[in-house]
Amino acid sequence: MATLQAIKYNDGHLEILDQLLLPESCVYIPINNVQDAWGAIREMKVRGAPAIAIVGSLSLAVELRKLATPETKKDLHSLVKEKLDYLVTSRPTAVNMQLAAEACIKLSNNLVDKDSVHAAEAKDVVVKHLEATLANDIADNLAIGEHGATDITKKCGNKDQLRIMTHCNTGSLATAGYGTALGVIRSLHKANLLDQVYCTETRPYNQGSRLTAFELVYEKIPATLICDNMAAAAMKQFKIDAVIVGADRVAANGDTANKIGTYQLAVLAKSHNILFYVAAPFSSIDFQIPTGQSIPIEERPHSEMTHTGNIRTAAAGIHCWNPGFDVTPAELITGGIVTEKGVFKPDQLEQHD
Ligand SMILES: CSC[C@H]1O[C@H](OP(=O)(O)O)[C@H](O)[C@@H]1O
Protein backbone atom coordinates (compact mmCIF):
# COMPACT_ATOMS: atom_id res chain seq x y z
CA MET A 1 0.00 0.00 0.00
CA ALA A 2 1.28 3.46 -0.88
CA THR A 3 2.21 5.67 2.06
CA LEU A 4 1.54 9.38 2.33
CA GLN A 5 4.08 11.61 0.56
CA ALA A 6 5.31 14.76 2.31
CA ILE A 7 7.46 15.73 -0.67
CA LYS A 8 6.80 15.45 -4.42
CA TYR A 9 9.72 16.15 -6.75
CA ASN A 10 9.90 15.58 -10.48
CA ASP A 11 12.35 17.02 -12.99
CA GLY A 12 12.88 20.34 -11.28
CA HIS A 13 9.31 20.72 -9.99
CA LEU A 14 8.88 20.60 -6.15
CA GLU A 15 5.71 20.44 -4.06
CA ILE A 16 5.15 19.76 -0.35
CA LEU A 17 2.11 18.58 1.54
CA ASP A 18 1.06 21.48 3.80
CA GLN A 19 1.16 19.68 7.16
CA LEU A 20 -0.52 22.56 8.99
CA LEU A 21 -3.75 21.54 7.22
CA LEU A 22 -3.55 17.83 8.13
CA PRO A 23 -5.47 15.72 8.90
CA GLU A 24 -8.52 17.67 7.70
CA SER A 25 -7.23 18.36 4.19
CA CYS A 26 -4.38 17.24 1.92
CA VAL A 27 -3.12 20.30 0.03
CA TYR A 28 0.14 20.32 -1.94
CA ILE A 29 1.85 23.68 -2.33
CA PRO A 30 4.63 24.57 -4.81
CA ILE A 31 8.16 25.35 -3.63
CA ASN A 32 9.72 27.41 -6.43
CA ASN A 33 12.90 28.59 -4.76
CA VAL A 34 15.01 28.63 -1.57
CA GLN A 35 12.98 31.48 -0.10
CA ASP A 36 9.77 29.44 -0.40
CA ALA A 37 11.49 26.49 1.27
CA TRP A 38 12.83 28.61 4.13
CA GLY A 39 9.34 29.94 4.88
CA ALA A 40 7.65 26.54 4.66
CA ILE A 41 10.23 25.00 7.00
CA ARG A 42 10.04 27.88 9.50
CA GLU A 43 6.22 27.78 9.60
CA MET A 44 6.35 23.97 9.86
CA LYS A 45 4.30 23.40 6.74
CA VAL A 46 6.98 20.76 6.24
CA ARG A 47 8.84 19.44 9.29
CA GLY A 48 10.89 16.52 10.45
CA ALA A 49 14.68 16.52 10.50
CA PRO A 50 15.24 14.56 7.25
CA ALA A 51 12.36 16.22 5.38
CA ILE A 52 13.72 19.68 6.24
CA ALA A 53 17.10 18.82 4.68
CA ILE A 54 15.50 17.23 1.62
CA VAL A 55 13.12 20.13 0.90
CA GLY A 56 15.93 22.62 1.45
CA SER A 57 18.26 20.73 -0.89
CA LEU A 58 15.63 20.23 -3.58
CA SER A 59 14.61 23.90 -3.46
CA LEU A 60 18.18 24.83 -4.40
CA ALA A 61 18.13 22.24 -7.20
CA VAL A 62 14.92 23.86 -8.49
CA GLU A 63 16.60 27.28 -8.51
CA LEU A 64 19.83 26.08 -10.12
CA ARG A 65 17.99 24.26 -12.91
CA LYS A 66 16.24 27.51 -13.87
CA LEU A 67 19.41 29.56 -13.56
CA ALA A 68 21.63 30.47 -16.53
CA THR A 69 25.06 28.92 -15.92
CA PRO A 70 27.18 31.29 -13.82
CA GLU A 71 30.25 32.80 -15.52
CA THR A 72 32.72 30.85 -13.40
CA LYS A 73 32.73 27.93 -10.98
CA LYS A 74 33.72 30.40 -8.25
CA ASP A 75 30.47 32.30 -8.95
CA LEU A 76 28.54 29.03 -8.77
CA HIS A 77 30.23 28.10 -5.48
CA SER A 78 29.47 31.51 -3.94
CA LEU A 79 25.81 31.23 -4.93
CA VAL A 80 25.50 27.64 -3.62
CA LYS A 81 27.12 28.60 -0.30
CA GLU A 82 24.96 31.71 0.14
CA LYS A 83 21.71 29.79 -0.50
CA LEU A 84 22.59 26.82 1.71
CA ASP A 85 23.84 28.98 4.59
CA TYR A 86 20.47 30.76 4.45
CA LEU A 87 18.50 27.50 4.50
CA VAL A 88 20.37 26.35 7.61
CA THR A 89 18.91 29.36 9.51
CA SER A 90 15.32 28.15 8.99
CA ARG A 91 15.28 25.99 12.17
CA PRO A 92 18.20 25.48 14.59
CA THR A 93 17.83 22.10 16.31
CA ALA A 94 17.73 19.46 13.55
CA VAL A 95 21.24 19.01 12.17
CA ASN A 96 20.29 17.41 8.84
CA MET A 97 20.06 20.68 6.86
CA GLN A 98 23.43 21.82 8.28
CA LEU A 99 25.14 18.54 7.36
CA ALA A 100 23.55 18.50 3.90
CA ALA A 101 24.68 22.09 3.34
CA GLU A 102 28.25 21.33 4.46
CA ALA A 103 28.46 18.32 2.11
CA CYS A 104 27.17 20.25 -0.89
CA ILE A 105 29.37 23.30 -0.22
CA LYS A 106 32.40 20.98 0.03
CA LEU A 107 31.46 19.34 -3.30
CA SER A 108 31.01 22.71 -5.01
CA ASN A 109 34.31 23.97 -3.62
CA ASN A 110 36.16 20.85 -4.80
CA LEU A 111 34.78 21.38 -8.31
CA VAL A 112 36.27 24.91 -8.42
CA ASP A 113 39.76 23.38 -8.29
CA LYS A 114 39.04 20.75 -10.98
CA ASP A 115 40.31 22.35 -14.20
CA SER A 116 38.76 19.58 -16.32
CA VAL A 117 35.24 20.50 -15.16
CA HIS A 118 33.64 23.65 -16.65
CA ALA A 119 30.93 25.77 -14.96
CA ALA A 120 27.91 24.19 -16.71
CA GLU A 121 29.09 20.67 -15.85
CA ALA A 122 29.80 21.73 -12.25
CA LYS A 123 26.23 23.03 -11.95
CA ASP A 124 24.87 19.69 -13.21
CA VAL A 125 27.00 17.79 -10.67
CA VAL A 126 25.70 19.96 -7.82
CA VAL A 127 22.07 19.62 -8.96
CA LYS A 128 22.35 15.82 -9.17
CA HIS A 129 23.91 15.74 -5.69
CA LEU A 130 21.02 17.79 -4.27
CA GLU A 131 18.39 15.67 -6.05
CA ALA A 132 19.93 12.44 -4.73
CA THR A 133 18.92 13.35 -1.14
CA LEU A 134 15.39 12.06 -1.77
CA ALA A 135 16.30 8.51 -2.83
CA ASN A 136 19.14 8.30 -0.30
CA ASP A 137 16.73 9.02 2.57
CA ILE A 138 14.23 6.37 1.50
CA ALA A 139 17.02 3.78 1.30
CA ASP A 140 18.22 4.80 4.78
CA ASN A 141 14.72 4.49 6.22
CA LEU A 142 14.10 1.02 4.77
CA ALA A 143 17.39 -0.14 6.31
CA ILE A 144 16.53 1.49 9.65
CA GLY A 145 13.18 -0.28 9.58
CA GLU A 146 14.72 -3.70 9.09
CA HIS A 147 17.56 -3.25 11.60
CA GLY A 148 15.19 -1.88 14.21
CA ALA A 149 12.54 -4.57 13.81
CA THR A 150 15.14 -7.33 14.06
CA ASP A 151 16.75 -5.84 17.15
CA ILE A 152 13.52 -5.15 19.05
CA THR A 153 12.21 -8.64 18.31
CA LYS A 154 15.45 -10.22 19.51
CA LYS A 155 15.70 -8.12 22.68
CA CYS A 156 12.03 -8.74 23.47
CA GLY A 157 12.61 -12.51 23.52
CA ASN A 158 11.25 -13.08 20.00
CA LYS A 159 7.75 -12.13 21.15
CA ASP A 160 5.48 -12.08 18.12
CA GLN A 161 2.90 -9.52 19.26
CA LEU A 162 4.77 -6.42 20.32
CA ARG A 163 3.35 -3.29 21.91
CA ILE A 164 5.33 -0.21 20.91
CA MET A 165 5.02 3.38 22.08
CA THR A 166 6.18 6.25 19.90
CA HIS A 167 6.26 10.04 20.13
CA CYS A 168 5.79 12.86 17.64
CA ASN A 169 5.88 12.02 13.93
CA THR A 170 8.75 10.14 12.40
CA GLY A 171 7.06 8.60 9.39
CA SER A 172 6.52 9.44 5.73
CA LEU A 173 5.51 12.95 6.82
CA ALA A 174 8.89 13.61 8.45
CA THR A 175 11.09 12.08 5.75
CA ALA A 176 11.21 11.25 2.04
CA GLY A 177 9.11 8.18 2.84
CA TYR A 178 8.67 5.15 5.12
CA GLY A 179 10.14 6.95 8.16
CA THR A 180 12.62 6.35 10.92
CA ALA A 181 10.97 5.24 14.20
CA LEU A 182 7.69 4.82 12.36
CA GLY A 183 9.64 2.94 9.69
CA VAL A 184 10.64 0.39 12.34
CA ILE A 185 6.97 0.14 13.31
CA ARG A 186 6.03 -0.35 9.63
CA SER A 187 8.62 -3.16 9.37
CA LEU A 188 7.29 -4.86 12.52
CA HIS A 189 3.75 -4.61 11.13
CA LYS A 190 4.82 -6.02 7.75
CA ALA A 191 6.38 -9.00 9.59
CA ASN A 192 3.14 -9.56 11.58
CA LEU A 193 5.02 -8.86 14.82
CA LEU A 194 2.99 -5.84 15.93
CA ASP A 195 0.07 -6.03 18.33
CA GLN A 196 -0.45 -2.29 18.88
CA VAL A 197 1.21 1.10 18.50
CA TYR A 198 0.56 3.66 21.24
CA CYS A 199 1.17 7.10 19.74
CA THR A 200 1.27 10.19 21.92
CA GLU A 201 -0.59 13.36 20.94
CA THR A 202 2.68 15.34 21.20
CA ARG A 203 1.47 18.74 22.23
CA PRO A 204 1.50 21.55 21.34
CA TYR A 205 1.91 21.04 17.54
CA ASN A 206 0.21 17.62 17.85
CA GLN A 207 2.43 15.75 15.42
CA GLY A 208 1.15 12.53 16.99
CA SER A 209 -2.61 13.07 16.86
CA ARG A 210 -2.59 14.97 13.55
CA LEU A 211 0.20 13.24 11.63
CA THR A 212 1.24 9.87 13.09
CA ALA A 213 -2.34 8.81 13.76
CA PHE A 214 -3.15 9.87 10.18
CA GLU A 215 -0.36 7.70 8.75
CA LEU A 216 -1.27 4.69 10.92
CA VAL A 217 -5.01 4.87 10.14
CA TYR A 218 -4.22 5.39 6.43
CA GLU A 219 -2.23 2.13 6.37
CA LYS A 220 -4.52 0.25 8.79
CA ILE A 221 -1.72 -0.29 11.32
CA PRO A 222 -3.30 -1.08 14.74
CA ALA A 223 -2.82 1.99 16.90
CA THR A 224 -4.14 3.79 19.97
CA LEU A 225 -3.80 7.53 20.51
CA ILE A 226 -2.92 8.66 24.04
CA CYS A 227 -2.43 12.09 25.57
CA ASP A 228 1.14 12.87 26.56
CA ASN A 229 0.19 12.75 30.26
CA MET A 230 -1.10 9.18 29.86
CA ALA A 231 2.32 7.72 28.95
CA ALA A 232 3.23 6.31 32.39
CA ALA A 233 -0.21 4.78 32.95
CA ALA A 234 -0.16 3.29 29.44
CA MET A 235 3.27 1.74 29.99
CA LYS A 236 1.94 0.04 33.13
CA GLN A 237 -1.58 -0.81 31.87
CA PHE A 238 -0.64 -2.12 28.42
CA LYS A 239 2.75 -3.65 29.30
CA ILE A 240 4.57 -1.77 26.55
CA ASP A 241 7.53 -3.75 25.16
CA ALA A 242 9.55 -0.86 23.76
CA VAL A 243 9.48 2.87 23.13
CA ILE A 244 10.97 4.10 19.85
CA VAL A 245 11.39 7.75 18.88
CA GLY A 246 13.16 9.78 16.20
CA ALA A 247 15.92 12.34 16.49
CA ASP A 248 16.69 15.83 15.35
CA ARG A 249 20.31 15.86 16.39
CA VAL A 250 22.36 13.08 17.99
CA ALA A 251 25.61 14.21 19.62
CA ALA A 252 28.83 12.18 19.30
CA ASN A 253 28.24 10.49 22.68
CA GLY A 254 24.67 9.52 21.74
CA ASP A 255 22.82 12.23 23.70
CA THR A 256 19.76 12.92 21.54
CA ALA A 257 17.68 16.04 20.90
CA ASN A 258 14.16 15.14 19.87
CA LYS A 259 10.64 16.52 20.19
CA ILE A 260 9.81 17.94 23.61
CA GLY A 261 8.47 15.15 25.81
CA THR A 262 11.00 12.57 24.62
CA TYR A 263 13.20 12.95 27.70
CA GLN A 264 10.30 12.25 30.07
CA LEU A 265 9.35 9.15 28.05
CA ALA A 266 12.93 7.91 28.42
CA VAL A 267 12.80 8.47 32.20
CA LEU A 268 9.44 6.67 32.40
CA ALA A 269 10.71 3.80 30.23
CA LYS A 270 13.67 3.36 32.58
CA SER A 271 11.44 3.28 35.64
CA HIS A 272 9.17 0.68 33.98
CA ASN A 273 12.14 -1.38 32.74
CA ILE A 274 11.07 -0.84 29.10
CA LEU A 275 13.59 -0.70 26.23
CA PHE A 276 14.04 2.83 24.83
CA TYR A 277 15.26 3.24 21.23
CA VAL A 278 16.20 6.20 19.09
CA ALA A 279 15.89 5.70 15.31
CA ALA A 280 17.99 8.06 13.23
CA PRO A 281 20.01 8.00 10.01
CA PHE A 282 23.67 9.08 10.20
CA SER A 283 22.47 12.28 8.49
CA SER A 284 21.02 13.22 11.93
CA ILE A 285 24.24 12.56 13.86
CA ASP A 286 26.46 15.56 14.64
CA PHE A 287 29.96 14.30 15.37
CA GLN A 288 31.12 17.91 15.62
CA ILE A 289 29.56 18.19 19.09
CA PRO A 290 30.67 15.93 21.96
CA THR A 291 27.50 15.90 24.07
CA GLY A 292 23.87 17.04 24.03
CA GLN A 293 24.77 20.16 26.03
CA SER A 294 25.83 21.91 22.80
CA ILE A 295 22.58 21.24 20.90
CA PRO A 296 20.61 24.49 20.26
CA ILE A 297 16.99 24.09 21.37
CA GLU A 298 14.43 25.97 19.28
CA GLU A 299 11.82 28.02 21.13
CA ARG A 300 8.54 28.04 19.23
CA PRO A 301 5.82 30.79 19.29
CA HIS A 302 3.72 30.82 22.49
CA SER A 303 0.59 30.92 20.32
CA GLU A 304 1.21 27.24 19.50
CA MET A 305 0.42 26.60 23.20
CA THR A 306 -2.24 29.21 23.90
CA HIS A 307 -4.37 28.67 20.78
CA THR A 308 -5.88 25.82 18.81
CA GLY A 309 -6.07 27.32 15.37
CA ASN A 310 -7.57 30.76 15.93
CA ILE A 311 -9.34 29.77 19.14
CA ARG A 312 -7.65 30.84 22.40
CA THR A 313 -7.50 27.98 24.90
CA ALA A 314 -5.16 29.46 27.53
CA ALA A 315 -5.69 32.53 29.72
CA ALA A 316 -4.58 35.76 28.05
CA GLY A 317 -1.49 37.20 29.69
CA ILE A 318 -0.08 33.90 31.00
CA HIS A 319 3.67 33.55 30.50
CA CYS A 320 4.64 30.50 28.41
CA TRP A 321 7.69 28.32 27.86
CA ASN A 322 7.58 26.49 24.52
CA PRO A 323 10.84 24.64 23.74
CA GLY A 324 10.38 22.50 20.62
CA PHE A 325 12.85 19.86 21.81
CA ASP A 326 14.59 18.32 24.80
CA VAL A 327 17.74 16.24 25.15
CA THR A 328 17.68 12.59 26.25
CA PRO A 329 20.99 11.53 27.83
CA ALA A 330 22.67 8.55 26.15
CA GLU A 331 22.43 6.38 29.28
CA LEU A 332 18.62 6.37 28.99
CA ILE A 333 18.73 5.03 25.40
CA THR A 334 18.74 1.46 26.64
CA GLY A 335 17.65 -0.31 23.43
CA GLY A 336 20.19 1.46 21.27
CA ILE A 337 20.37 3.85 18.35
CA VAL A 338 18.86 2.34 15.20
CA THR A 339 20.66 3.56 12.07
CA GLU A 340 20.84 2.49 8.41
CA LYS A 341 24.17 0.79 9.27
CA GLY A 342 22.81 -1.18 12.21
CA VAL A 343 21.78 -0.80 15.86
CA PHE A 344 24.50 0.61 18.09
CA LYS A 345 25.05 1.46 21.72
CA PRO A 346 25.23 5.27 22.05
CA ASP A 347 29.01 5.17 22.68
CA GLN A 348 29.62 3.06 19.53
CA LEU A 349 28.46 5.64 16.97
CA GLU A 350 31.81 7.25 16.20
CA GLN A 351 33.46 3.97 15.21
CA HIS A 352 30.73 3.42 12.59
CA ASP A 353 30.83 6.88 11.01
C1 LIG B 1 12.33 11.60 11.41
S1 LIG B 1 12.81 12.53 12.74
C2 LIG B 1 11.52 13.67 12.91
C3 LIG B 1 11.71 14.48 14.17
O1 LIG B 1 11.40 15.85 13.86
C4 LIG B 1 10.32 16.24 14.68
O2 LIG B 1 10.39 17.60 15.04
P1 LIG B 1 9.51 18.68 14.21
O3 LIG B 1 8.16 18.05 13.97
O4 LIG B 1 9.47 19.87 15.15
O5 LIG B 1 10.28 18.94 12.96
C5 LIG B 1 10.42 15.35 15.89
O6 LIG B 1 11.42 15.77 16.78
C6 LIG B 1 10.74 14.04 15.24
O7 LIG B 1 11.28 13.07 16.07
Image: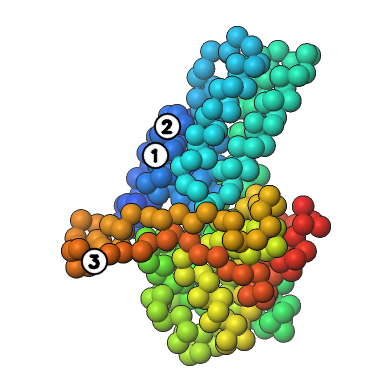
Residue with the most extreme right position: 351
Kindly state the secondary structure of the residue where label 1 is placed.
Answer: helix
The answer to the question of whether label 1 and label 2 lie on touching residues, with beta carbons closer than 8 A, is: yes
Asked if marks 3 and 1 touch (Cβ < 8 Å), the reply is no
Mark 2 Cβ inside 8 Å of ligand 1: no
Q: Secondary structure at mark 2?
A: helix
3 or 1: tag closer to the N-terminus: 1
The quadrant where residue 155 appears: bottom right
Residue at the image position 45 percent from the left and 29 percent from the top: 33
Q: Is residue 240 left or right of residue 4?
A: right
Judged by depth in the image, the label closer to the viewer, 3 or 1, is 3
Residue 32 vs 331, above or below: the answer is above
Callout 3 secondary element: loop
| Residue bearing the label numbered 1 | 39
| Alpha carbons under labels 3 and 2: distance apart | 34 Å
The answer to whether residue 66 is left or right of residue 342 is: left
* Residue 318 - label: 3
Type of amino acid at the residue the image marks with label 3: Ile
Question: Which residue is the site of mark 2?
Answer: 35
**How many marks do you count on the picture?**
3
